[in-house]
Amino acid sequence: MSRASSLATGVPARSPRILVTADAVGGVWQYSNELAAGLSRLGIETILAVMGPAPSDAQREAAAAIPGVTVIETGLALDWLAEDGRALRDAGDSIRELGAEHKADVIHLNTPALAAQTKFGAPVVAVQHSCVASWWEAVQGSEMPDDFAWRTKLVRAGLHAADAVVTPTAAFGEATRRLYALTQAPRTVHNGRTPLPVTEGAPHDFVFTAGRLWDEGKNVRTIDAAAAGIGVPVHAAGPLKGPNGAEVMFDNIHCLGTLSEAEIARWLAARPVFVSSALYEPFGLSVLEAAAAGCALILSDIPTFRELWKDVAIFVPARDEGGFTRAIADLVGDDFERTVMGRAARERAKRFSADAMAAQMASLYRSLLPAIQRPVLASARAAA
């Protein structure tokens, strides 16, 4: 509602509210925080309902610092960690109650399965960041086990029940459409990321990667094998053990553990060659962080990476250890090519801003509301 219309009706305008589910385990946490910050700049409040394992103190502080954000730690089950369908039904019902309590205008589910068994009293946007079905197809390529099958069934029901479905890349959107028999492809809204504060300096001769190192989908073992034939250090940031009990160890990579954003920024400031050999990556925020810092990219040749980084990265078949060894050795030894590629990656990264992501999501939220409510989702600048 504009200021003029609120004065005319005598009803004070309130900021629109979006309830966003999140978790502190992986990239969804960063996505949710960036979205909330971008929505705040548009005059939109966010109720951040944190599910799954509790966030760290640093994560709590970062979320609490975002204007217009209310953080609620629910401890509710995540779809890929839930013991059974009842746990997800209970989680969905609890999110519905939170939405009603906080008078949310739109429910944004980063866990689409929550919509499978719960009817929300507001429009639902399901954002499909990843899923066990597409992960299994990319990583294992065999028939899914029963433990994955029932989860997939609930995700499918949730996607079909949602008022709108969003994916972070068109390539992953097509996979989602195919796997869940959607009548149309999801809307593509690329993830956005505020560049980390890095200082300019001469590039250093080492390789860097980051992410959930324990996740088979990240395929870090290929980088570890390639590192045996590389004459420079290979450093990896991220946890070695996941909340699902998965754990990994490496022979040739120097593992740094889970780093803060400031620590990641210091590593990226040295502009190493950034490598990802992921078999499965619906978007890849760590790649975006490296690109925004001006790092040259060597990436696995998968559809999502091609969509995002075509012409500004070197692509290698995901399981080709020798190919990664050769590509890394060639690029580390060519300062000119590294500089050119790093600049190209940085320029491409500018497309994927938090404000662009938030503006597209705000437009989608607005489209789902009755016409009489839509003006309330105008930006703060338009309302002035």
Image: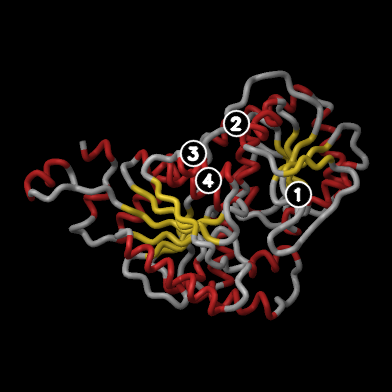
SS under mark 3: loop
Q: Give the Cα separation between the discs numbered 2 and 4.
A: 29 Å
Residue 295, above or below 359? above
Residue ID at (36%, 63%): 99
Residue ID at (49%, 39%): 353
Tag 3: amino acid: Ser
Residue ID at (40%, 46%): 69
* Circle 4/circle 1 CB separation < 8 Å: no
Tag 1: amino acid: Ser
* Circle 4/circle 3 CB separation < 8 Å: no
Say whether residue 265 is left or right of residue 194: right
In front: 38, or 173?
A: 38
Category of crowding for the residue at label 2, using alpha-carbon neighbours closer than 10 angstroms: few (below 14), some (14–19), many (at least 20): many
Sequence-wise, the earlier of marks 3 and 2 is: 2
SS under mark 2: helix
Residue 192, above or below 73? above
Q: Give the Cα separation between the discs numbered 3 and 1.
A: 24 Å
**Displayed quadrant of residue 293:** top right
Q: What residue sits right under mark 1 in the picture?
A: 277
Q: What residue sits right under mark 2 in the picture?
A: 346
Q: Give the Cα separation between the discs numbered 3 and 2.
A: 12 Å
Q: Give the Cα separation between the discs numbered 4 and 3.
A: 23 Å
Sequence-wise, the earlier of marks 2 and 1 is: 1
Sequence-wise, the earlier of marks 4 and 3 is: 4
SS under mark 1: loop
In front: 326, or 71?
A: 71
The quadrant the C terminus occupies is top left
Category of crowding for the residue at label 1, using alpha-carbon neighbours closer than 10 angstroms: few (below 14), some (14–19), many (at least 20): many
**Displayed quadrant of residue 232:** top right
Q: What residue sits right under mark 4 in the picture?
A: 60
Q: What residue sits right under mark 3 in the picture?
A: 353
Q: Give the Cα separation between the discs numbered 4 and 1.
A: 31 Å
